Structure formats: C-alpha cells, structure tokens
Amino acid sequence: MTRTFHTLTALALLACSQPSQAQELPELPELSELPEPLAAFIDEARAGCTEFEAGTLAVEWGAVRRVDLDGDRRSDWALNESGLASSSSLSFFCGTGGCSSMSTAPPAEGSTRRPA
C-alpha cells in the first residue's frame, strides 16, 4: 500500500513538473481577421452577454485557432466555445451538454462551390 502511494505521488510530481525548456504558445489570431461567419458569432455572443445582466464577453486563449481542417495545407479557422466566457453567467456558452465548436474553410482554388 505504501509503495503504491509513493509510486502515485512520484507520477503526480512528474506530471506536474514544468518542462526544462520554455515552450512558446501559438500566437492568438486577431479577432478582426475572423471570417464573416465567426465574426458574426462573436458579435452575437458579445450582444447576448450584454443583454444578460450587462455582462461582458471574454475571448480567452485557445478560443480561436488557425488549423488545417481540410488537408489543403492552408490554415482554416476554428472557434471553440469553451474559450468564451461571460461575466454574468458561468454557463452562458457551455452547459451540462458540453461546448460547441464551429469552423470555416475557404473553398479550394478553382472551386465553384460557394461557402455555406
């Protein structure tokens, strides 16, 4: 029993220790660069926070990311509501059912498809 406790304690300390080299975090994309569907969502979220007990919206690190979603080697946009926070309600964006995510990718070059 004592041996198990010491092993678990050592593993916990190892997991919590900081890496020896500083890791740089990816740069947070500017909200002004967001494509229209995501910018409109942020604007609606901000208005919703304001309407509910005069709250304010915080867009936290990790809420908006640039990732290649469709394999075309171009960065697309992804928004995860877990990085949005309202000062007037802890569950404004994420509740017992979890958080939503949305993404947008531009059409491929030469495509006649219009973005949804």
Image (tube, rainbow, N blue to C red):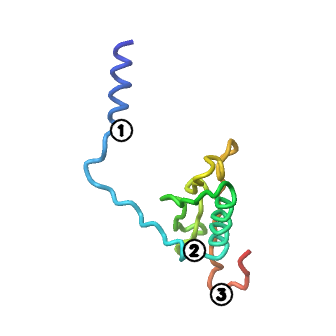
- Kindly report which numbered mark, 3 or 1, lies closer to the viewer in this rendering: 1
Instruction: Evaluate if marks 1 and 2 touch, with contact meaning CB atoms under 8 Å apart.
Output: no
Q: Secondary structure at mark 1?
A: helix
Within 10 Å of disc 1 (Cα), the crowding (few <14, some 14-19, many 20+) is: few
When asked about the image quadrant of residue 110, the answer is: bottom right
Q: Which mark is residue 58?
A: none
Residue kind at label 2, given as amino acid type: Leu
Q: Secondary structure at mark 3?
A: loop
Q: Nearer the viewer, residue 30 or 70?
A: 30
Residue kind at label 3, given as amino acid type: Gly
Query: Measured from the top left, where is residue 60 in percent x and y?
Result: 50, 58
Query: Counting residues from the N terminus, which is met first, the one under dot 3 or under dot 2?
Result: 2
Q: Which residue is mark 3?
A: 110
- Kindly report which numbered mark, 3 or 2, lies closer to the viewer in this rendering: 2
Instruction: Evaluate if marks 3 and 2 touch, with contact meaning CB atoms under 8 Å apart.
Output: no
Cα separation, mark 3 vs mark 1, equals 49 Å
Residue kind at label 1, given as amino acid type: Cys
Looking at the rendered image, the quarter that the N terminus falls into is top left
22 sits left or right of 89 in the view: left
When asked about the image quadrant of residue 95, the answer is: top right
Cα separation, mark 1 vs mark 2, equals 35 Å
Q: Which mark is residue 34?
A: 2
